[in-house]
Amino acid sequence: MSGKTDRKLDSSGKPMLDFITKICDEIGPRVGGSEAEDKAGNMIYKEMSTFCDEVEKQEFECHPGGFLDYIWVTAIFYIVGVLFYFFIPLLSAILILLGILIYFAQQALTLEIIDFLFPKVHSFHVIGKIKPKNEAKNLVLLGGHHDSAYEFPLLSKLGGYSRYLIMLTLVISILNIILSLVNSIIVIPFLDYIQIGLFFIGVPLILIIAAFLRSNKGVLGANDNLTAVAAILEIGKYLAKDQNRPEKTEVWLVSFAGEEHMRGSKRFVSMNKEELDRRNATLFNLECLSGESFLLATAENLFFATHSEKVINMGKRAADDLGIDIQVGPLKFAGSDSANFSRKGLDASTLFGRVKKGTPADWHTMRDTPERLDGESIAKGAEIALHYVELVDQN
């Protein structure tokens, strides 16, 4: 590797694979707010306690059902709205529009306006802190999440194409609104036939999305996202050794809870923003590191988040120094905890492992198991994050 930075971690990824397998075997799926999520958090806390200078749990409350199960509320607004077209067209337009707004508010903007309709749960993040040799001038957060997702049957069958089904349903809903507004102003009988046709297309579509968006099965989440948790632990063990400690950079290893419903990191930001702002902290987040390629995200389109140029440039430099090829660009589908940081003006980005067609390997499917992981890919992602810390410490 002449001319390139030497790698510091086990290139096979075996220690990380062993940790991932242990959590999957002993705990299993870990959906947000569950006892299993807590068990995983406690196991990570115990592991961090063996090498970190400080370890803490940050507890929070939220309503996870508001992130995905809002779709049933949206479906009800849509169906009732379409039926009102034949009685009160203006009310029809209002109801369908409300359904669309609930979609954007709950999923894209994570505003939690109807979260109160769903059960409250308690979760906690785990934060392991590694102090520098000298006074801390920088603060770097390395992030991953230990909760796992529900199975997405729609995604299992259609893959990334499932977003086109959602987009088609959205387009039909907008057409419903336009027809309702026109009919409230002037009666055009021909429009009724169009509306009926859209009704017979739109209602099945939205019911299919609602019924198959998620099942009641939790996935093991080996790649999404125990690969990241295992990576930050391995990085932490390296940095905690006296000879490897950063000179002036404090490192927080953050294992987020509740990423799969996007409430966890939102709570983390609200609880820690003052300190993160004051200390000019950056988040280098990791997701689904077992893959065929890496994407360093400049944005997460689904959540209207634009990431930090500072983090992106440093992350790209870290990969280049190591001779690891990565792509830099927007994430068009799915998202990460970095979205909640960037939307609040904090410096963040996420390194995603992907397969060639663009989505993370086995994402939100029952196939996301330890035996399908590529240890060398995980090790490469960990090396990039480790070198990111080293570069920040040099500046």
Image (cartoon, grey):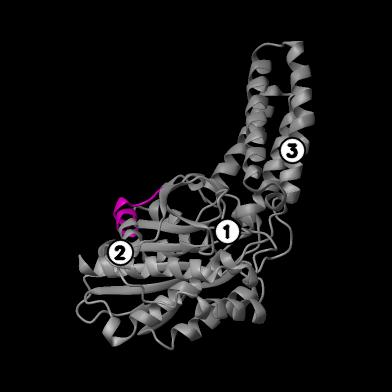
Residue for badge 2: 281
Question: What amino acid is found at the position of numbered circle 1 in the picture?
Answer: His
Work out whether 164 lies above or below 87.
below
The answer for how far apart the CA atoms under marks 2 and 1 are is 24 Å
SS at mark 2? Answer: loop
Label 3 crowd bin: few (<14), some (14–19), many (20+), radius 10 Å: some
Q: Residue at x 42, y 69 (%)?
A: 382
What's drawn in magenta, residue-wise? 306-315
Q: Give the x, y percent position of residue 83.
A: 77, 29
SS at mark 1? Answer: loop
Residue for badge 1: 261
Question: What amino acid is found at the position of numbered circle 3 in the picture?
Answer: Leu
Badge number at residue 205: 3
Q: CB atoms at circles 3 and 2 under 8 Å apart?
A: no
Work out whether 332 lies above or below 292.
above
Residue furthest front as drawn: 2
Q: Quadrant of the C terminus?
A: bottom left
Left or right relative to 88: residue 6:
left
- Determine the main secondary structure of the stretch shown in magenta: helix
Q: Nearer the viewer, residue 284 or 384?
A: 384
Q: Earlier in the sequence, mark 1 or mark 3?
A: 3
Question: What amino acid is found at the position of numbered circle 2 in the picture?
Answer: Ala
Question: Can residue 125 be seen at all in this image of the molecule?
Answer: no
Label 2 crowd bin: few (<14), some (14–19), many (20+), radius 10 Å: many
